[in-house]
Amino acid sequence: MPRVHPDAFFWPSMHKPCAVIPVYNHEHALVHVVEALRIAKLPCILVNDASSPACTAVIETLASQPDCYAVHLLHNQGKGGAVMAGLREAQLLGFTHALQVDADGQHNLNDIAAFLQRSREHPLAVICGYPEYDASVPRGRLYARYLTHVWVWINSLSLQIRDSMCGFRVYPLASTVSLINRVKLGRRMDFDPEILVRMAWQNQPMEWLPTQVHYPLDGLSHFRLVHDNLLISKMHAKLFFGMLLRAPKIICSRGRR
């Protein structure tokens, strides 16, 4: 008997996407990001990660528009913490999928339609951006990515994760929120790679699309080269030992597919 792919049971009418944008003092670029998302007719959830009063005022003004919502965090949670708060809010508002978008303008929003179309075609999959960089990418961050790629392949026992650092993704909310409610994930720049590794452990389908990345529109980056690379290294070490414990189960489950 032929095997029926689980996506076949997901009706197109159940695909109700939104955008989740973690915001920390990117008020100038944020206006342009939200404008592009509204042109794409994508509802927006802005997660104010304890930004300055000036940025908070911009967020509140944007959230007064139709299909634009604000979540205000009293204390700075970091990018991962803000994204998780936004994903939970998206599910509470009745959305089924969420496009994660950075507020600093580095993501190519011309790719929104392609990412959402792939998500409609594969609604159970995480649609992940595979970055194509221009000359604006900081050299230190670019080189560190290659080391992260190797550790991600080791910790996931797979080569399927082409890039774990690009945050331009469409998450299926049911499986994603279940994971973030069940597991303590990194709350800062370690979030993006860790969640993909843990999804790989549970055989979450993933689809990959190339996307151009530019750093950044307003010249403000919150990536701390030493601190965040140490944080990511700690995350890789934690995942490595987690992988060792799960390896037999992971290998067995993939052998049955």
Image: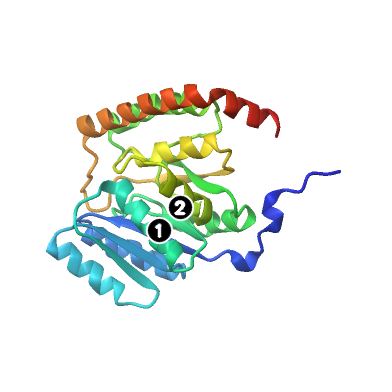
Q: Along the horizontal axis of the image, is 161 left or right of 235? A: right
Tell me the quadrant of the picture where the N terminus can be found. top right
The front one of 184 and 157 is 184
Specify whether residue 165 is in view. Answer: no
Res 54 quadrant in image? bottom left
Q: Position of residue 226 (x, y in %)?
A: 21, 29
Tell me the quadrant of the picture where the C terminus can be found. top right
- Residue pictured at 50% horizontal, 34% vertical: 162
Q: How many marks?
A: 2
Crowding around mark 1 (Cα neighbors within 10 Å: few <14, some 14 to 19, many 20+) is: some
Q: What amino acid is labelled 2 in the image?
A: Val
Q: Position of residue 57 (x, y in %)?
A: 18, 69
Q: What amino acid is labelled 1 in the image?
A: Arg
Q: Secondary structure at mark 2?
A: helix
Work out whether 143 lies above or below 46.
above
- Residue pictured at 24% horizontal, 74% vertical: 61
User: Where does label 2 land, which residue?
Assistant: 177
Work out whether 211 lies above or below 53.
above
Res 38 quadrant in image? bottom left
Q: Say whether marks 2 and 1 touch (CB < 8 Å).
A: yes
Q: Secondary structure at mark 1?
A: helix
Work out whether 112 lies above or below 226.
below
Measure how far apart labels 2 and 1 are at the Cα level: 6 Å
Res 164 quadrant in image? top left
- Residue pictured at 52% horizontal, 60% vertical: 113
The front one of 48 and 246 is 246
Q: Along the horizontal axis of the image, is 49 left or right of 116? A: left
Residue at far left of view = 53
Mark before the other along the chain sequence, 2 or 1: 1
Crowding around mark 2 (Cα neighbors within 10 Å: few <14, some 14 to 19, many 20+) is: some
Work out whether 171 lies above or below 158.
below
User: Where does label 1 land, which residue?
Assistant: 88
